[in-house]
Image (spheres, helix red, strand yellow):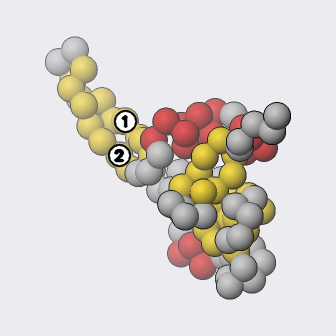
Amino acid sequence: MIIFYDKITGEITGTIRGRLHNEDQLRMWIGDENENGRIICQWKKTETLNKDKTEEIWEPEIQTELFTELEKNSSLLKELVVDTNKVEIVRRPLVP
């Protein structure tokens, strides 16, 4: 998944879904590159031994739990923003 966000507010402005991205997708950008940033999460293949057999497992390279949850439920994006200082995705702060 590729997530585009506003560099000032951290608001998510768009996404490109998927586990693996081709060169064309990696060159894509939403909006002005000076105003918008992006977080690219590729998925990596790992192998694990499970009950005497090797299984292929795919997991996100970054923020593993969050990207796994996003893949199952894309509407979760509405609850997220990007922490522009750490450049990582976080849950939107609750407003009292």
Can residue 79 be seen here? yes
20 relative to 79, above or below: below
Q: Amino acid at mark 1?
A: Ile
Residue that mark 2 sits on: 45
- Which residue lies most toward the right here? 96
Dots 2, 1 in contact, CB < 8 A? yes
Point out which mark residue 57 bears: 1
Q: From the viewer's perspective, is 15 left or right of 49?
A: right
Point out which mark residue 47 bears: none
Classify mark 1: helix, strand or loop.
strand
- Which residue lies most toward the top here? 51
Callout 2: few (<14), some (14-19), or many (20+) C-alpha neighbours within 10 Å? few
Horizontal and vertical percent for residue 24? Answer: 60, 76
Residue 51 sits in which quadrant?
A: top left
Observer-nearest of 89 and 76: 89
Classify mark 2: helix, strand or loop.
strand
Horizontal and vertical percent for residue 91? Answer: 65, 41
Callout 1: few (<14), some (14-19), or many (20+) C-alpha neighbours within 10 Å? few
Q: From the viewer's perspective, is 57 left or right of 20?
A: left
Q: Quadrant of the C terminus?
A: top right
Horizontal and vertical percent for residue 67? Answer: 55, 43
Residue drawn 21% across the image and 26% down it:
49
